[in-house]
Amino acid sequence: MKIDRLVKEQSVIVCCGAGGVGKTTVSAALALAAARNGRKALVLTIDPARRLAQALGIPPTGHEPSAIDHELMRAAGIDVPEGGELHAWMLDPASVLESVVDRFAPSKEAAQQIRDTRLYNALKEVMAGLQEFTAAEALYDFKERNVYDLIVLDTPPSRNALDFLDAPRRLARFLDERTLSVFVPQPNSKRSAIIRAASKVVTTAMSKAFTPEFVSELQQFLSAFAALFGKMRIHAKGVRQLLQSKVASFIVITSTEEAAFEEALFFDRRVRELGLKVEGFVLNRTYLDSKDAPHPDELASAEEDNGVKEILSKLRPLAETEIQRIASDEALFEKLVSVSSSSGGDGAVALPYLDETVEDLEALAALSARILKLDRSQAC
Amino acid sequence: MSSVNLMSKVEPIWSRELVLVSGKGGVGKTTLTAVIGQMAAEAGRKVLIAEVTPDLHTTSPLLSHFGHPRPRSEEPFRISGDLYGIRIAPQSGHRLFLRQALKVRLLVDAAMKSAALTRFLMAAPTFPEIGVLFQIVHLIRQKRFDHVIIDLPATGHALALASLPRVVHRVVPTGLIGDAIKEGLDILTSASRCWAVIPTLPESMPVTETGELIESLHECGIKVGAVVLNRIPNNPLTDAERAHLDRWSAQNSHGRFLGARELVRVDRALAAQMMFRSGLPERLIKYEVPELHADRDQTRLLRFPAYLRKPLNLSPTDHFESRESSPVIEEGQA
């Protein structure tokens, strides 16, 4: 996979994968690499690595992206050429929802009317299920405003990430007038007999389940929201088109953990089912760069100090573990390369298990430099 | 057994009607759920292990442990002896409450077939979670099981499920859903009926995040019963040997040798273990489980329970007594 090219030329990179595989770190490293190539890059993250965020000077919640200070970067030995900028934002579902209402409501009064409903406030409070809509919406918005050369989207952990891909479609379905007409009161003349019948069943069920007061409140809420639906539906389509277009690339990131790896393969299938293309895989935290490292026994045979000899002999089980890890990592890597090439992707790259967790700009810069050196289907 | 003695004993990890196994992905939640369920069943309890899934048509990681990768039933089914399993999907919860709301089964099936309704229920934020919660309440209400042990999805989801009842309850205080949610809230926040068990890994980030999760759950009124530090790597060297090795390494230019990386992992694990022992609240029951290398999952499942009988906070004599003998402890320690 030519990550180098993606970083220099692509306008949207979506990073997917299971939780805990280093997705956020890789996303940030890609955005940093773009900035070092003179591009204005934004990394959007939902599941932030807190300390990395702190090191970058990103506030935990904010209404908009913040730029990483050039002084900070220079202090960490990172040169950013003219025009290069790195921005980061931890997506805050509540503020994205606010801005959707503000931008789409036909008037200030209408926006206020929506904000006044109890349901809206409950919705804002409950983040569950909102993250995916938020990610899709934020991505589209930034793309539309054309502020950044590259947007790297770090998606929520895998199962939710599938929702993210499906979010535009789900939203479109939710906003489908036929679905809504069942809930939102409309003049009877406009409704077909089937809709009327369905509406009756649904209203009965909902009233019994939720109380009639709630159902009427829900209907009010949906009516108030209805003004926004048309525009939101256009967005839902837009996000899909954007993700299907050539300017967007999906990368699946995985660790060598069995569960994460299975998720990655599952994810690859799902992305393709949704009619989108996976550019390639990143296999993170491999031991592949230790392939030619000497065995402790070799070192011991050349050693005179008996104490050291004995200690080295105690490392045999660890060396054995690493030999097995290298072999299994190789197999995993080959598997990813073949999966990718059989589905028209561009292969895979492997990154090493790092001695230090990436928690500051220097470490991030080192990682991003390393990623850029990787060529097609190359390890470490 | 005197009552004084009982007081000093630590409660087994399954000792609540509802046990929520929660944490990030890849930390061993599913295995832990399986192990706890099996241990409780072997201790003579009637146990239901449950997995929350968005889709009943996929393979079940939890029930695969017991040879049921794709259970057909949406109801609890017997795995073996007193151990039962179920998958909880939002849709089954929705059907359940419609069934209770409408009484007439035909009407329910018609309603669930209405594409509009099912779409709405799955697409509207929080409705899937309500479906899951409704089903949990239903299972607890039935009182068929001594313990319901739930393998929850990733952290965000557990918290979502936990914080959901309050919000929804404010909006829908009464009615079938409102009542069920009120009941769910009561169960979740009753320290004597429900607790959370959180597995984590011996790395600094996961342990830090576990601390945050404990706080958030506490804010939602959910008791955290136990934390489990999973997959602790074996350290083959004493501190003196390690210091000796490091001095020698500094004087030689052999570069990275095989095993050096594993030593780094051991170092990280030791640091994380310190955080786990002293950085997380004292009142929690803490367990530590070594990395169990096994050819087959089954062997791992057999060796795992020994470590859940020995909480850290207590001296060896204080360990609670299990009704079964535990011949695997020695092997597990080896």
Image (tube, coloured by chain):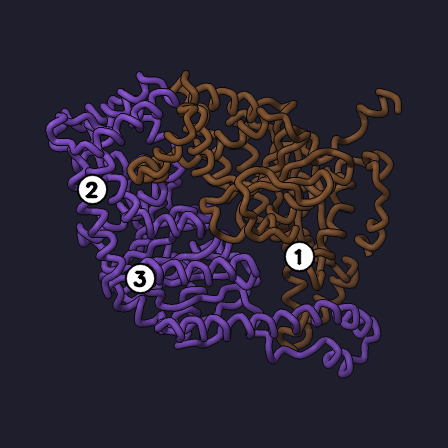
Chain colours: A purple, B brown
Q: Which of marks 3 and 2 is nearer the N terminus?
A: 2
The residue pinned by badge 2 equals: A232
Q: Classify mark 2: helix, strand or loop.
A: helix
Above or below A250: residue B221:
above
For label 3, the crowd category at 10 Å Cα-Cα, with few meaning under 14, some 14 to 19 and many 20 or more, is: many
User: Which disc number belongs to residue A220?
Assistant: none
| Identity of the residue drawn at 31% across and 28% down | A202
Hey, what amino acid is under mark 3?
Answer: Leu
User: Which disc number belongs to residue B267?
Assistant: 1
Hey, what amino acid is under mark 2?
Answer: Met
| Identity of the residue drawn at 79% across and 53% down | B332
How far across and down, in percent of the image, does residue B103 sit? Answer: 43, 24
| Identity of the residue drawn at 43% across and 33% down | B95
Q: Which chain carries label 3?
A: A
Q: Mark 1 lies on which chain?
A: B
In this view of the protein, which residue sits in the foreground, B246 or A31?
Answer: A31
The residue pinned by badge 3 equals: A276
Q: Classify mark 1: helix, strand or loop.
A: helix
How far across and down, in percent of the image, does residue B107 sit? Answer: 37, 30
